[in-house]
Amino acid sequence: MLSSFVNRRNAGRFVPVVLAGFILAACGVYQEDQTPSATLQPTANQGSAYYLQQMQQSQDDSRSHWQLLAIRALLDEGKVAQAGQQLQQLPSQLTADQQVERHFLTAQYAIKQKQFREAAQQLSALSVPGLNDTQRQRYYQLMIDSAQGEAPIDVLRAYIALQPHLAGSDQQKNLDATWQTLVTIPQDQVGYITINANENILQGWLDLLGVYYQNRGDQDNLKHAVQDWQTRYPDNPASKTLPAGLAQVMNLSVASTNTIALLLPLTGPGAVFSKAIEQGFEDARNGHLASSAPATPDANTVIRAPQTTASATSDAAVSPSAVATPAADTSSATADASNQTAAVLGTASANTAAQIKVYDTNGHPIDQLLQQAQQEGATLVVGPLLKEDVAKAVTTQTSLNILALNEPSDLQNHPNVCYFALSPENEARDAAEHMWAQGKRSPVLLLPSNSLGDRVAAAFTRQWQSLGGGTVLRQAIGSESDLRSKINSNAGIALSGTPVTAAPSSDSGAVTVAGMTFDAPSAQPVADSGGVDSVYIVANQASLDLIKPLITMKIGSQSHVAFYANSLSSQAGTGPDFRFEMEGLQFSDIPLLSGANPSLKQQVTGQFNQDYTLTRLYAMGVDAWTLANHFTPLRQQPGYQLQGNTGLLKATQNCVINRTLSWNQYTHGEIVPAK
């Protein structure tokens, strides 16, 4: 501050300056508003239009300052394309502070574009010790956003580093997010994580995870173990305030499974499918499941996932493989595939004391059946199976817990409802995850030209683009006679197609088996550019036997294009000719049919005359028993996982049970686990 004392001999020199100040004020020129913050912090209540206007009226460093502030505002306002244009127009000569801001904004822009590796590269260019407190908070949050669930230890480090920079409720939110990331680490990996000797906070979190895994089956033990952990780690922020997810587990009110109402269509065309589900449920309750390994000790024991891939929504309760053709099985169909899952299937323990009452959903309205079930002592409902019945059940005013065996088109969160279904969308999302993990980046989908194809295309593309992928091409598969005509004319199948524009997730229910169809966007076909590196095929075994040779006919046998298929092609009785023809092709299926439990597979496929459709539904019934016995943690703990016969079962948003499938591969005439 200037001294209030002014030498009288110099007073006259200040008169012109003061007059100039009055003149500028009178003319309405606001010099202060034209100078951007030196720390590049946004002005309160100002949007991108304000910053862009100031940028146009400024020059040199001030112009770059305003431009950077405008880009940040554009990103916050969701105007990503315009922000990208401004990023490209930034001058190459920037001050040190401006260079730091450009790295931040480029990383933020890359995250918006789902270019997570680019975002990480931008952040790695920053020197953290040179950042101020506000910048560090931004840095760690962008690190978390760019990780997208990968490298959980690095994400945990970012959450830990972020915690001291937060205050109030933001600290609790950060603790909760830290816990949610922590529980994504499988139990069998916790003891093999290597960290630095000085990472005491991270070590405390990992020890807390171990305490949770070792004691979550017993609430009293868990409470005592957590209290002991708090004594050992008093400086850990979670010791002072437990994460909400952990506190919730410690205070769960476990749902009773003494009397279960099973709601299925026991008459009509769906009766045969319902009988398979009911049989699986009853056999699991009674302990009549053949096992190649010791059974899970109790219903609270959870076994982590094998290396496979994921999902769960449905317009049909079963996957496309429901139309598989019965045939004689062959031992080579699962040669040594039992090595695919390193864990014992986590089927809940038998409980013959539990009462199961079955109600025919074709006999009475759903609301009446729910009322009747409650009057007859039911505490939990498994079903209904049909989509329209599920929609009615979840909107009925009932206090019963409901494990629905399908999903309504308009999915809503209900505190007493979880959804479990087998679906082609499930397999499509799983395929996108699997192919992306194998390094594929330019897929083409060969799909039927019907609602099934539309649903698969939309689900695959949404998942693909959520991972950071770009354009997905789709090509229609003709009938078997069309395919044979191509064989006879040596036409082949080119790997080209029409770009798929995935509908928003909220519209995923627009298609139902009842007749509504997915509105496919219009787009122009794209010619084969030679850049396709993978193809995902949804076809039955007979069609696949023609499709793969037709593609090879066109691209040559030396091509490096990878082939993938869903379980529709997985049927009993694959002969050696077919298996050799499919060399290298990978396909997804449920663990039970992929050799996870050979004894149970033999029992069930023999019972259903090698019908893989009914086998999958039987496995669904077995898993429904397991899910019913874990209903409370599934409903109240997002991310809760169980290893099931139909896949790795994971509770996701709205308690939709997501299934991770097994992947197999044809190799030298045998079916082995995919690498």
Image: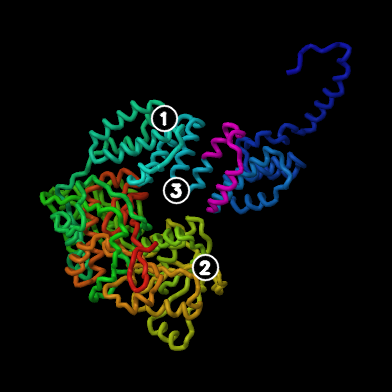
**Whole-percent x, y for residue 96 in the image:** 69, 38
The first of marks 1 and 2 along the sequence is 1
Q: Which residue is mark 3?
A: 149
Q: Which residues are magenta?
A: 114-140
- Amino acid type at image mark 3: Gly
Is residue 317 visible to the viewer in this orientation of the structure?
no
The picture quadrant where one finds residue 26 is top right
Q: Which residue is mark 1?
A: 237
- Amino acid type at image mark 2: Pro
Q: Extreme left residue here? A: 353
Against 280, residue 323 (above or below) is below
Q: Extreme bottom residue here? A: 488
Question: Any magenta on residue 136?
Answer: yes
Query: CB atoms at circles 2 and 3 under 8 Å apart?
Result: no
Residue at the spot x=44%, y=63% of the render?
Answer: 458
Is residue 653 visible to the viewer in this orientation of the structure?
yes
**In this picture, residue 551 sits left or right of residue 247:** right
Q: Which mark is residue 65?
A: none
**Whole-percent x, y for residue 658 in the image:** 34, 55
Label 3 and label 1: CA atoms lie apart by 22 Å
Against 670, residue 370 (above or below) is above
Label 2 and label 3: CA atoms lie apart by 27 Å
